[in-house]
Every structure is written in structure tokens, then in C-alpha cells.
Image: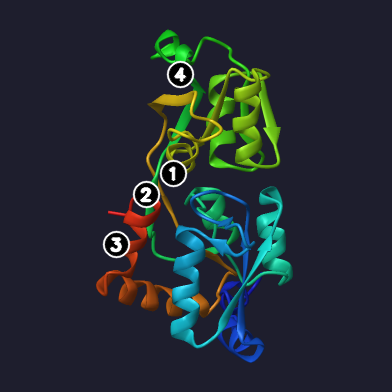
Amino acid sequence: STSQSDSTVKTVADLDKVKDANKLVIGITDYEPIDYQDKDGKWIGFDADLSRAVAQKMGIDVEFVVINWDNKFIELNSGTIDCIWNGMTVSDSVKTNCDISDAYAGNSQVVVMKKDSLSKYADAIKNANLTIAVEKGSAGEAEAKKLSKNVVSLSAQSDALKEVKSGTADACIIDSTMANSMTKEGTDFSNLGYSVSLTTEEYAVGFRKGSDLTAEVNRILGELKTDGTMDKLSKQYGVNLAK
């Protein structure tokens, strides 16, 4: 039998690691308005700007690494990235695979379809057996599998939107944060919309189990909440803060 001490998680000294490297390496996907590139190729967005503000208070830089979302925990545990900070929905699977920060933003999974189809499926989505596009490994994928046998899993939420626009999928299930941003007037997807929200959830940052970065980032997030930085980003990017 293993003694008690073997099963407790040892403290992982990530704080020293990132300070020695002078950078926090963050795993992201291209996900407007959370993490996306401006015309000069600089990463901006609610999470990009917030993580930069946190790193600044730690006296270090940030480096954004685009990861395959389905492999996020592998990237984290192998040490390729120091944290997952990309509108990650808190779920049992997330809690099993990593330590998480305090929740910083609120979100829901929504069913996006062409605007002219919305009234037809107001509440009958469950038995309509629609073809639903999702991002592989996402919270939306888990919801879609409850609703339909025809789930198409793609590498990004933006690809799921494209399937609906082109008509190869009837609907996609993505984060409301992204849906609100990407289906606004004047966007490529302005003929899409949603009327059904499936879940209410929160976003948190993922760290290695036992990482001492978790407490430090929580402490700084608290400061950025108090000084109004998070409110400002919430208004700028249209992202709701966690209650």
C-alpha cells in the first residue's frame, strides 16, 4: 500500500521556473474575443490582455503558444506550456487534469444556426437530429453529443461556425463569448445567431497539479479585479466577469 505522503501532490515550483525563464508560456487557440491576432499579428483579447497584466505584475513576459485544444493537458503536463489560459470551461475533466485558478469570467454553450432557422428549432433541438459542428475536446462537443448522433468534431470553434455558414452543418455549439463577437452586424457570420443556451459555466486558468503558480495568479487576479482592470477588459471585449 502507498503511504499517505506518496499520494499527496508535491508542490511544483513553477514560479521559479517562469521567473528564471523571464516568461509565462501560455497555451491558447485562436478564439475571438479571448485570444486573437490584430492586423500586426500581436495577440490581443480578453484573456491575452489579462494574462499580460498578470505577467507584468510578476515582472515577466508572456509567450503565447497555439495548441491543439484536444491535447491541452498533454501540453501542460509535458511542460511545453506553463498554463492553459484560453476561455477554458471549468468541468470535472478539467479539475481532474489540472489545478485551476479562481473563475474569472462567465460563459454559456449556445446553439448557433442560420437566423432564418432559429424559430423552427426554438425548443425542439433535442429530437431534430441535426448535424452539429463543434471543436474537438470542447464543452460544446460534450453538449452536442447529448443532442444528436451527427456530431462533427473539428479543430477550432471558428471552423464549426464556417460549417454552419456553408450549410454543411445545421448548427454548431460554441461559447456564447465567441458567438456574440463573431455574429455581430458587419461580421462574416452576421447571418447566424442563437436563441438557445444549454449551460451556464465559468472560465478558469489551468496549471500543473500542485503548481505554486495557481496561488500567485489568484492573488494577482484579485488585485486586477479590485483596481478595475478586469472591468475595463470586460467592457472592451464584451466578456462577462464571473459572479
- Picture residue at 58% right of the left edge, 14% below the top: 130
Viewer-side label of 1, 2: 2
Assign a secondary structure to mark 2.
loop
**Looking at numbered disc 3 in the image, what kind of residue is underneath it?**
Asp
Assign a secondary structure to mark 3.
helix
Q: Give whichever of discs 1 and 2 has the lower sequence position.
A: 1
Label 1 close to label 2 by CB (< 8 Å): yes
- Determine which residue is flagged by label 4: 115
* Figure check: 149 above or below 93: above
Q: Is residue 100 visible?
A: no
In which quadrant of the rendered view does residue 54 lie?
bottom left
**Looking at numbered disc 2 in the image, what kind of residue is underneath it?**
Gly
In the rendered view, does 202 fall on the left or right side of 38? left
Whole-angstrom CA distance, mark 4 to mark 3, is: 31 Å
Whole-angstrom CA distance, mark 3 to mark 1, is: 16 Å
- Determine which residue is flagged by label 2: 238
- Give residue 184's position: percent from left, percent from top: 43, 35
Whole-angstrom CA distance, mark 3 to mark 2, is: 10 Å
Question: Is 41 in front, or is 34?
Answer: 41
Q: Is residue 35 visible?
A: yes
In the rendered view, does 163 fall on the left or right side of 203? right
Q: Residues within 10 Å of mark 3 (few under 14, many from 20)?
A: some
Q: Residues within 10 Å of mark 2 (few under 14, many from 20)?
A: some
Q: Give whichever of discs 4 and 3 has the lower sequence position.
A: 4
Q: Give whichever of discs 3 and 1 has the lower sequence position.
A: 1
In the rendered view, does 238 fall on the left or right side of 59? left
- Determine which residue is flagged by label 3: 231
In which quadrant of the rendered view does residue 110 lie?
top left
- Determine which residue is flagged by label 1: 177
Whole-angstrom CA distance, mark 4 to mark 2, is: 21 Å
